[in-house]
Every structure is written in C-alpha cells, then in structure tokens.
Amino acid sequence: MAEAAGPALGYEECVQPHLDYLYGVAIRLCGNRTAAEDLLQDALLRAFRAFGSLRDREHPRRWLTRVLTSAFYDRIRIEMGDALYRAVDEEFDLFDKIAEEDPFPYSDRLHLDFLDLFDDTRILEVLGRLLPQQRLAVILAYVYGFTAKEIGEISGRPVGTVLSWLHRGRKQLERELWEYAVDHHLIAEGRVRS
Amino acid sequence: MISCTEAVARLWAYLDRNLGRLEEQELEGHLGLCRHCCGELEFARHLRALLRRSGAAVALPGETRARLEALIRELGGQR
C-alpha cells in the first residue's frame, strides 16, 4: 500500500526558494554577473530536464548545487582544457609572507590590515583566479559550510580528492591574495628588502 | 611535539573540527607553546570570515530575477 503523503512538490516549488542561493554560488564561481546569470539559466534548464531524478523534494538544495556545479564544470573543462590541471605551489605561506615583506611598517595589526584590503569585489576576483575544482571546493566549504563528504557527493568525487582540492585551494588562495595585492599596487612588494 | 609545518597544515581542519582526537591534542599541545602558529591560527580564522562574507553584497539583480522566475514558472507549467 502506498504511504500517506502530500503531493510531491513540483519543479517550481522546489527551485524557486533557492534562486538567491544558486545565484550566490554562481557569482562566486564565475566572478562576474553576466557569466553567473548565464550559468544559472543553464542550471535551471538542466534541473528541469533531470527533475525526475530528484528524490528528496523537500530538501533539494544539495541536488540543485550538484546540477549547478556540474554545469559550471562542463563549461570550464571546455574553456580551459589541460590548463585545468596546472600545478599549484603548495609551499607558499601568506602569514609568513606578510610578516617577511611587512607591507604596513607602522601597523600593529599587520595581517589584518592586509585582509582589510579585500572588499567583496576584490575577493570575488581572487576566487576567480583559483583553479575551478579548487575554487568550487573552497566556496562550498568555506562560504557555505558544506563538509568534505557533502562536497564529494555534490561533485561525484571521493572525499580524499575533495580534501586535496581544499588543501591546494587554500594554498592557491593565499598566493593569489598576495599576487593580487601586488598586481593592483595595493602594497609595495619588496619595500623592506630594497 | 609536531613541527610548525605539520601544525600549520592542520589548522583549517582544526577549525572545521575535522581532526581526530590525537591529531587535535598534538596540535593544541603545539599551539600552547608556539606563538607563531597561534598567529597563523588567528589569521586563518579571519581569512575564513572574509570568505564567508564574500559576495554577500552581490544580490540577484531585479531584472534578472524577473526573467529567471518567469523561466521557472514556464518550465514548471510544462510538468
């Protein structure tokens, strides 16, 4: 006998409440509004086509995240080709770099002053410099609080792979924050050494 | 005692509460004696807070929202 339950939620009821969330993920992944809107539209169409595979319609957020990130990854794989797998410098340590270079010689909160350089726009640009799979992991883990296991389910990868993405993503993030600050003349690299 | 390199490598997992009991005890033992790694820990906390805030001010533009909501309604109506 069938279980007594209310009617299953339809596509619109499942997707609509998560539109802002999905856009938030998309803008962080893409780094600009146009690409984020394009990605989100693609994801909505994919979600519609695959809607029959959604089992838990009361809690569709993780499934929608998987659809969105899958669409993102498909795009980026075509755009980037082999560059998707470039090596990351895992030795860089931003905390030490800031202490060594001392970009704010009169500050007693040197490291926090460095982070204060990054408003929303700049941090989105820095995230955009990370390799896509690492960007994805960093965003899902540290912006949205997904666990490595959940990110593994979303991305269809083993937890060990996700942990590796997170580790490399953090190291790449540290380097990119520094290089962004130098490239945009927010700090003067080599001030102390010169 | 674990090295600074090992301690720093564990900091984010520590903040995520993803370390095993022994790994956590080793790290906390190190942090109790190492000012440098305490600084790294505080810095990691602030960097994570910066990431959490990132993009919070970037809301879905009204015109795009209207367009996407219309798309959702149209697709939903096909089922």
Image (cartoon, grey):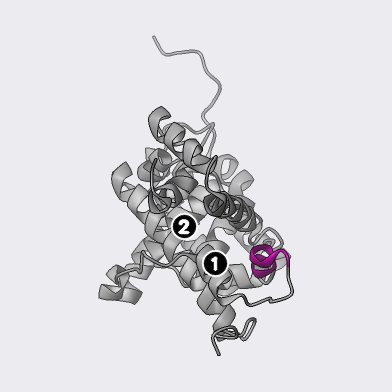
Q: Nearer the viewer, residue B8 or A72?
A: B8
Helix, strand or loop: magenta stretch: helix
> Is A119 one of the magenta-colored residues?
no
**Residue A38 visible in the snapshot:** no
Identify the residue at horizontal 51%, vertical 70% (top origin). Answer: A97
Dot 2 falls on which chain?
A: A
Q: Which residue is mark 1?
A: A36
Q: For residue B1, what is the image quadrant?
A: top left
Q: Is B15 left or right of B60, judged from the image as shown? A: left
Q: Is B63 left or right of A153, judged from the image as shown? A: right
Residue that sits furthest to the bottom in the current view: A194
> Could you give the CA–CA distance between mark 2 and mark 1, rounded to whole angstroms?
10 Å
Q: Nearer the viewer, residue A28 or B5?
A: B5
**Residue A114 visible in the snapshot:** yes
Q: Nearer the viewer, residue B30 or A37?
A: B30
Q: Is residue A106 above or below residue A12?
A: below
For the C terminus of chain A, the image quarter is: bottom right
Indicate the amino acid at tag 1. Ala
Give the magenta range.
A108-115
Please state the horizontal and vertical placement of residue A42, each as a whole percent of the image.
46, 62
Element on which disc 1 rests: helix
Please state the horizontal and vertical placement of residue A140, each as a whole percent of the image.
49, 50
Q: Which residue is mark 2?
A: A43
Residue that sits furthest to the left in the current view: A82
> Badge 2: few (under 14), some or many (20 or more) residues near its Cα, within 10 Å?
many
Q: Nearer the viewer, residue B64 or A176?
A: A176
Indicate the amino acid at tag 2. Ala
Identify the residue at horizontal 49%, vertical 48% (top origin). Answer: A141
